[in-house]
Image (cartoon, rainbow, N blue to C red):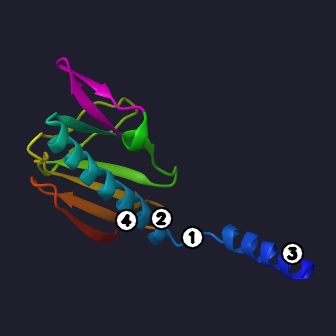
Amino acid sequence: MVVVVIVSILAGAVVMSIPRDINDQFKEQADRFEVLLRMAQDEAILQSRELALGFTDSGYAFFQLDNNAWLAKTDGPFKPRALPASLEAKLYLEGVPVILDSKIKPQVFIYSSGEVTPFVYQLSLPSRGKGIKLDVNPIGEIKREMLDE
């Protein structure tokens, strides 16, 4: 019985140490982003308040409008999110690339009606020439496309 437990612990450690497929990493980040965006839309509608989304070269964060000032949300599901260091992020507003740096500010707005500033968010792994593009329309629907650059 002890041998079986030791073997299963070692097998688990081996499985955990195997690098995941890069497509899984893109899918995981895209899934998380989609869920958070939908939650933010629901929150904006239910709370009748304006929210925003800001992007940096290494992640993204949500903001809420409070006394005519945008305040970053720092806890809960809308806390700032960092991307894995291997991923490169790109943002396009109205088809124009936005230069992302380390300073975060609201760039995409989520209105109390549930409408969203249309945008394209692209995550890629430059060393492998692969990526994923998330195209968000004004009602918040997301079209996902895998990229082979």
- Quarter of the image with the C terminus is bottom left
Q: Mark 3 or 4, which is nearer the eye?
A: 3
Say the numbered circle drawn on residue 6: 3
Mark 4 sits on what residue?
131
Residue name at image x 47 percent, y 64 percent: 25
The amino acid beneath tag 4 is: Gly
Q: Quadrant of residue 45?
A: top left
As drawn, the label of residue 25 is: 2
Residue 20 — which label? 1
Taking the magenta stretch, the answer to whether it contains residue 62 is yes
Residues drawn in magenta: 61-74
Q: Residue furthest right?
A: 2
Disc nearer the start of the sequence (3/4) = 3
Q: Which comes sooner in the sequence, label 2 or label 4?
A: 2
Q: CA distance from mark 3 to mark 1?
A: 24 Å
Q: Position of residue 133 (x, y in %)?
A: 28, 62
Location of residue 19 with respect to 89 vertically, above or below: below
- Whether tag 3 and tag 1 are in contact, CB under 8 A, the answer is no
Q: CA distance from mark 2 to mark 3?
A: 30 Å
Residue 3 in which image quadrant: bottom right
Sequence-wise first label, 1 or 2: 1
For the residues labelled 1 and 4, the Cα–Cα distance comes to: 15 Å
In three-dimensional space, the C-alpha distance between marks 1 and 2, rounded to whole angstroms, equals: 7 Å
Q: Relative to residue 77, is residue 6 drawn left or right? A: right
